[in-house]
Image (tube, rainbow, N blue to C red):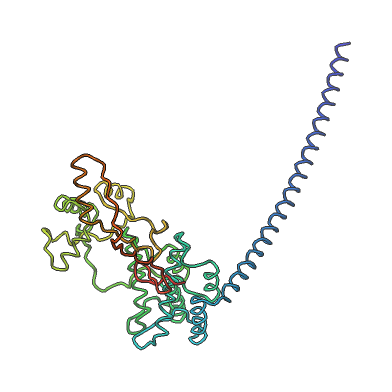
Amino acid sequence: MSSIQEIKALVTTSEHEVQIAKDALKATERGIEEAYERNRIAKATHDGLVIKLSNLKAQFREQIMEDGLKESNRWNEMYYKLLQWKESNDGDVLVPVDKDSDEDTKKLSRWVINQRSAYKYFMNGDTKHIKDHRIDALNKIGFVWCVADHVFQANVEELKQYHAENNTFDISLKENKKLSAFVSRVRSAYANKQDGRAQHDLTDEKIAQLDAIGFKWDFKKSRRKRKESTSTAFDFDTQIALLEEFKAEHGHTKVNKLIKEWQKGNGEPSKKEYRRLPKRVHLVCGGAAKFKALTDLGLEWKQPAHVPRKNTGGEASRKKKPKIEVSSHDQEFAAAAAELDVEAELPPLAVNVHVPALPSPHIPNDDAKFDDGRSTMI
């Protein structure tokens, strides 16, 4: 009898413990819900502060831009000339020139080109050629940083309108020479890209844009069937074997250097196939294997575009320090001391010896140029 009571007592105790555990679980769940709610409120507060900070930064950048444009300098002068050009030429900011353009228009066009060059340096990490607030000022007026992309967008819009009116993407040269050439170029580039040949101008984003308007990538069917090419002159294995022969004969892989000499009439290649070696190497299919094979062969690779360029300070950075010539007397004295194995100690200069003054350091002005001739003036 006592054992039954003990069992009942144990059951009662267990039920009580289970109830306590349930209550604790409910409390924990309430705590989790409260924690989620506090987290939600904190996240909403954080997002609100981020937006507020972003707005403050935008206002701050706007103020910096406005203050910068109030200054009196060459850059602001050209900026306001560009604004006048835009108002007088239906919103154009490209400033194209031809042989009949006046000198002021040519200067403005060169200035516009210089801003694009400076922006490329800026995007590569070299920020000394153009300031942030000047980029903001140019963006505000719709400045075109990449002419090729701008032309592509204009052609896509024109092609979209043509398709809406004619229900075709096949355009004859007689009908629209410019648009017909554009269609042929993108179709050729797309076909080359499908074959594994690099086409850097036709990016995936541009392909997606043309796909969005329903562009047909296939060429118009020709009446004559083209014969499939069986030539292996330009495949990778043939080319690298030819490059190996070239290196064995000349001791290096600088094909471009010798091709330029041959074109000038300075010598002839021992094999005419050497002229077909590529001046630039693009890796698409099997890139890693091809890269290793070419690197093992001794091919020198250029740094990628995102690596900041060195020595971009213009003409001033290339100025060498004045070279002080050593007189023949000093050279003879040093040579004699070396033969006697003694420390060479030059005798002091006479009082009446004339020492020419060193040239003053070069201070670049607004007309200083880049390595390739472009102005560094911003």
- Where residue 173 appears, as percent x and y from the top left, is 32, 81
- Would residue 263 be found to the left or right of residue 72 on screen? left
Quarter of image, res 233: bottom left
Asked if 279 appears above or below 366 in the picture, the reply is above
Query: Which quarter of the figure is the N terminus placed in?
Result: top right
Q: In this view, does 361 lie above or below 283?
A: below
Q: Is residue 269 left or right of residue 97?
A: left
Residue 103 percent location from the top left of the image: 39, 85
- In this orientation, which residue lies closer to the viewer: 259 or 25? 259
Residue at the location (26% across, 58% down)?
Answer: 325
Total marks in image: 0
Q: In which quarter of the image is residue 306?
A: bottom left
The residue sitting at the front extreme is: 351
Residue 120 location in percent, x, y? Answer: 43, 65
Given residues 181 and 114, the one toward you in this image is 114
Residue 21 lies in what quarter of the image?
Answer: top right
Query: Compared with residue 367, is residue 49 higher up or lower down, i.e. above or below?
Result: above
130, 17: nearer the viewer: 130
| x and y percentages locating residue 216 in the rendered image | 40, 70
Nearer to the camera, 77 or 170: 77
Position of residue 71 relative to residue 276, above or below, is below
